[in-house]
Amino acid sequence: MTTTATAMSQVRHRDLAQMLQDRRRAMQSEVQSRIRHARTDGRNEVLDESEHSEADIQDDIEFALIQMKAETVGHIDAALVRLEAGEYGYCSECRSEIAERRLRALPFAARCTACEDQRERGDARARRLAESRRGAATLLSDLGGR
């Protein structure tokens, strides 16, 4: 690697590390804020059944959001480990460089857009196949029960 390429690589590494750390701090702060808010959001007022049900739904949504944000922090932590190992920013499938735009949008991306699209198509095919097998099994059990 030339001196210029090495310097560019170091700058990219530093920029990506800063982006990941900034995103992690922001996400962690949001998780902590939501948890604090959930703890202090004591419902001392008397609620009727409908209001209580709506409050439970809101609590479930808030918990799901906290869980998703916490998982994102975990994904960013894994990306930081990949960065230190020299693997961050490269597709885990084809080893090509992941576009910076994609990394800025999804900082913990482990695959390039093309490989991710291919994986998602494969997952969709597997789901359709599983659904068709369940449907066939249901049909057979319905026919067998007659």
Image: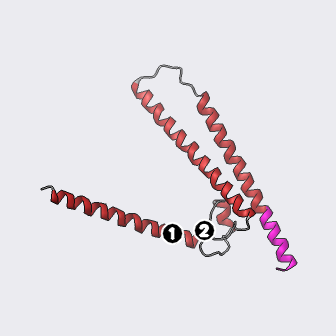
Task: Give the image's coloring scheme.
Answer: secondary structure
Which quadrant of the view contains residue 131? bottom left
Task: Specify the principal SS of the magenta part.
Answer: helix
Q: Residue at x 82, y 72 (%)?
A: 8
Q: Which residue is drawn at 86% across and 76% down?
A: 4
Give 62 or 139, whichever is nearer the viewer: 139
Q: In this view, does 2 lie above or below 126?
A: below
Residue 111: mark: 2
Amino acid under label 1? Arg
Residue 112 location (% of width, % of height): 61, 70
Residue 2 lies in the magenta-colored region: yes
Horizontal side of residue 2 vs 123, given as left or right: right
Give 126 or 55, whichever is nearer the viewer: 126
Q: What element carries label 2?
A: loop
Read off the residue under disc 1.
119
Identify the mark nearer the N-term, 2 or 1.
Answer: 2
Query: How many numbered markers are drawn?
Result: 2
Q: Is residue 18 above or below residue 56?
A: below
The magenta segment is 1-14
Q: What element carries label 1?
A: helix
Which quadrant of the view contains residue 28? top right
- Alpha carbon separation for disc pair 2 and 1: 9 Å
Residue 85 lies in the magenta-colored region: no
The C terminus, quarter of image: bottom left
Horizontal side of residue 142 vs 4, given as left or right: left
Residue 12 location (% of width, % of height): 78, 67
Amino acid under label 2? Arg
The N terminus, quarter of image: bottom right
